Image (cartoon, rainbow, N blue to C red):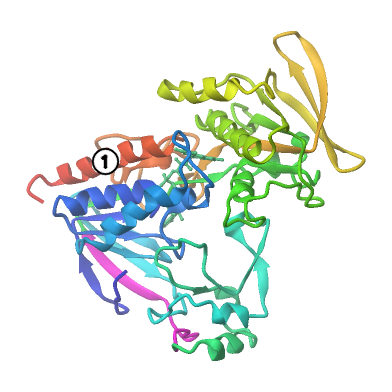
Amino acid sequence: MVEVQNGEALQAHTLVVGGGISGITAGIELAEVGRDIILIERNPYLGGRVAQMNLYFPKLCPPSCGMEINFRRIKNNDRFKFFTLATVDKISGEPGNFEVQIKIQPRYVNSKCTACGDCEKDCAIEVENEFDYGISKRKAIYLPHDMSFPHLYVVDPKYVNDEAMKACVDACEYDAIELDMKPINITVKVKSIIWATGWQPYDAAKIENLGFGRVANVITNVMMERLASSDGPTQGRIVRPSDGEGIKSVAFVQCAGSRDENHLPYCSGICCLASMKQATYVREIYPDAEIHIFYIDVRSPGRLEDFYVKVDEDEKIHFHRGKVAEITEVPGGRVKLVAEDTMAGDINTIEVDMAVLATGMVPNTAVDKPPVEVEMDENGFLIAREAQTVIGAGTVVRPVDVASCVQDATGAAMKALQTIIDG
Ligand SMILES: Cc1cc2nc3c(=O)[nH]c(=O)nc-3n(C[C@H](O)[C@H](O)[C@H](O)COP(=O)(O)OP(=O)(O)OC[C@H]3O[C@@H](n4cnc5c(N)ncnc54)[C@H](O)[C@@H]3O)c2cc1C
């Protein structure tokens, strides 16, 4: 991260918007072939949604294993500059000659922070923790997560003027908290812009028949990632939200809102594999748990089929072909699912301790468009075309896994290089 003054003008070859795996990859690829890049990220840390995963398929390694290498590459490369808490205000110009106005929100914590946590201990304000999708609480001054990069605390802007924050300032022996920090506006001149603002989970509350928000033990797949994570709200114990009890049975509901004209008409491509991966989380903790996966078609393209075959070998993982029509609560907090078995043509009812909705991925560009003329499809994905103003990378172009994002981002870096051949 670099320090800049309000009103400063910077120059680089490429601006990358979004600091998830796609943006980081595109930025590093360009910096390592000698181009200056500026990456901006709206969160107080880099890493995007991958940082919120427990393990990722196909190798089932923790996010830290891939991310740490990338963070090291960033630290070792002077050509890679990045700003957190930063967004684009305005873009003018065209490929080869863009001028972009960027707003950087204050962190209210300076680089003297050692992440010792003393300020947090003395902070009386507790709010919902968005990193854990609301399953846990965090303080108003907080480290977003254990492997946050940069490893600095941040103050929730809603509470910066709260009297209670004074105790945090007093607790910091490094004078790292500055509650009077102001937003900074900078201008960057670049030849190309890579847009990699990623995705957000489809809002499960909109799928009324599946009970999310109404039935306590119905959670979503992204919440399951946090429950299973050792740095998550339950330190990796997968338990029922209603009473913190362990589970003997669980159902995964595929295509929750996906491939459905009323919600997301497309397939997110990764949800089947994510549920199979999460079935292995459950199996690791509960050797005897009965695991049910309700699906329309199992999608495990290419070599990921091997993962499906392996999961299917588990005798207590049951694949049911059929769409879940309804989820309700039964006394004792159990969850009842009604599903059509499309193989046998029957309607089946099953009771389990917890249900996990495999909701799909919505491109952030569907709700937060780049402030420039850009071609998008009817679902808000950027269309990859030669003549585009900004170059899309990763899940803003299509819903994909990490490996595909890395390939996409490398392609986007190549396109950025081609914008101006001699650039
Ligand atoms: C339940 C679930 C489990 C999954 N498990 C796996 C798995 O095991 N293996 C696997 O390969 N894939 C998995 N995936 C897919 C994986 O999460 C994505 O492939 C990956 O997150 C995409 O990275 P990205 O950089 O494109 O987007 P993101 O991770 O969303 O990163 C985008 C970044 O851009 C930032 N941003 C957004 N808007 C702005 C803005 N306006 N200005 C600046 N910054 C902005 C965001 O804050 C974010 O940091 C899973 C997905 C789900 C739903």
**Magenta-highlighted residues:** 175-189
Q: In the image as oriented, which residue stretches furthest toward the right? A: 331
The question of residue 135 being in magenta is answered with no
Image height of 79 relative to 163, above or below:
above
Q: Which one is in front, 287 or 202?
A: 287
Quarter of the image with the N terminus in it: bottom left
Q: Is residue 348 visible?
A: yes
Image height of 344 relative to 21, above or below:
above
Judge left or right: residue 159 versus residue 66.
Answer: right
In x, y percent, where is residue 103? 38, 68
Image quadrant of residue 88? bottom left
Image height of 331 relative to 146, above or below:
above
Report helix, strand or loop for mark 1: helix
Residue depicted at 27% across the width and 52% down the height: 27
Judge left or right: residue 31 versus residue 117.
Answer: left
Q: Which residue is mark 1?
A: 410
Image quadrant of residue 76? bottom left
- Label total for image: 1
Residue depicted at 92% across the width and 40% down the height: 331
In x, y percent, where is residue 384? 32, 35
Image height of 282 relative to 18, above or below:
above
In x, y percent, where is residue 164? 65, 85
In x, y percent, where is residue 78? 20, 64
The question of residue 178 being in magenta is answered with yes
Q: In the image as oriented, which residue stretches furthest toward the top? A: 344
Q: Which one is in front, 88 or 396?
A: 396
Judge left or right: residue 258 versus residue 62.
Answer: right
Amino acid type at circle 1 is Thr
Q: Is residue 193 visible?
A: no
Q: Residues within 10 Å of mark 1 (few under 14, many from 20)?
A: many
